[in-house]
Amino acid sequence: MKLLQNSDLAKIKFNEEKLKLQEAILEGKYSFDSLINHLTIPKIQDKAAWVMSGVVEHRPKILTENEIGYLLKLLEDGISGVAERNIWRTFQFIDIPRVHEERCLHLAFETLENKKSAIAVEVFAMTTAFELSKNNEDLKHLLKEILLFKMGNSSKGFQSRAGKILKRIS
């Protein structure tokens, strides 16, 4: 198994190239850990996050509890919008370990309340917040209040996802 190099990610320009690298990681030709390590390199973190979300979509168990904690740390510290979107997208395919649930939920609510968050980031964070609050009436109520407040001044995509979640909460 080879370590992923900066140049392996830098040359990705199209979805086809991303899919080839994603498949190589899934086949064990490249180390998934080395992909995760590239999330801190500003010039290639967007591409690393894009590939990571595709890998995890196809093999959710590849992401360890420690790596989930690392992704949460990246969200806390601040990361590019593209990488942030793909980290939240990645969370759609996994079960957040209990040890990280509170931290992840806090970040999801924070993202939803941040007026500077991109719509796609908010939508993925919204879904994560819903999944983590399903079994807690107080958290579901809080999520409902946030969504109802934001729906009037939001995009059609946000309204659509929020509407679906609000139906499931009620």
Image (cartoon, rainbow, N blue to C red):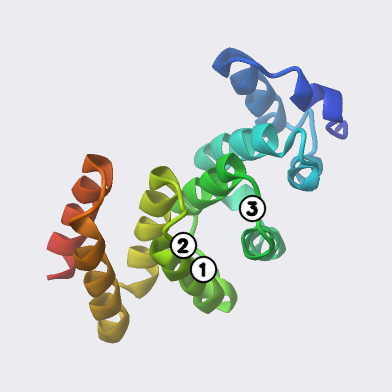
Q: CA distance from mark 2 to mark 3?
A: 22 Å
In the rendered image, the quadrant that contains the C terminus is bottom left
Which residue appears at 51% of the width and 45% of the height? 85
Side of 169 relative to 79 (left or right)? left
Residue 107 numbered mark, or none: 1
Q: Residue placed farthest to the bottom in the image? A: 138
Residue closest to the eye, 94 or 104: 104
Between 1 and 136, the one nearer to me in the picture: 136
Label 1 amino acid? Leu
Determine which residue is flagged by label 3.
63
Kind of residue at disc 3: Leu
Q: In terms of image quadrants, where is residue 30?
A: top right
Q: CA distance from mark 1 to mark 3?
A: 19 Å
Q: Earlier in the sequence, mark 1 or mark 3?
A: 3
List x then y, in percent, for residue 27: 69, 29
Task: Please indicate whether residue 154 sits to the left or right of residue 42 in the image.
Answer: left
Classify mark 2: residues with Cα within 10 Å, few (<14), some (14-19) or many (20+). Answer: many
Indicate the secondary structure of the residue bearing disc 2: helix
Q: Name the residue: 20% across, 57% down.
A: 151
Give x and y (percent) for residue 100: 57, 73
Q: Dot 3, how many residues are within 10 Å of its Cα: few (below 14), some (14-19), or many (20+)?
A: some
Residue 48 placement: quadrant = top right
Drawn side of residue 170 relative to residue 101, left or right? left
Check if mark 1's residue and mark 2's residue have beta carbons within 8 Å: yes
Look at the picture and state if 132 lies above or below 44: below
Query: Residue at label 2?
Result: 111
Identify the image quadrant of the N terminus: top right
At 87% from the left and 34% from the top, the residue drawn is 3
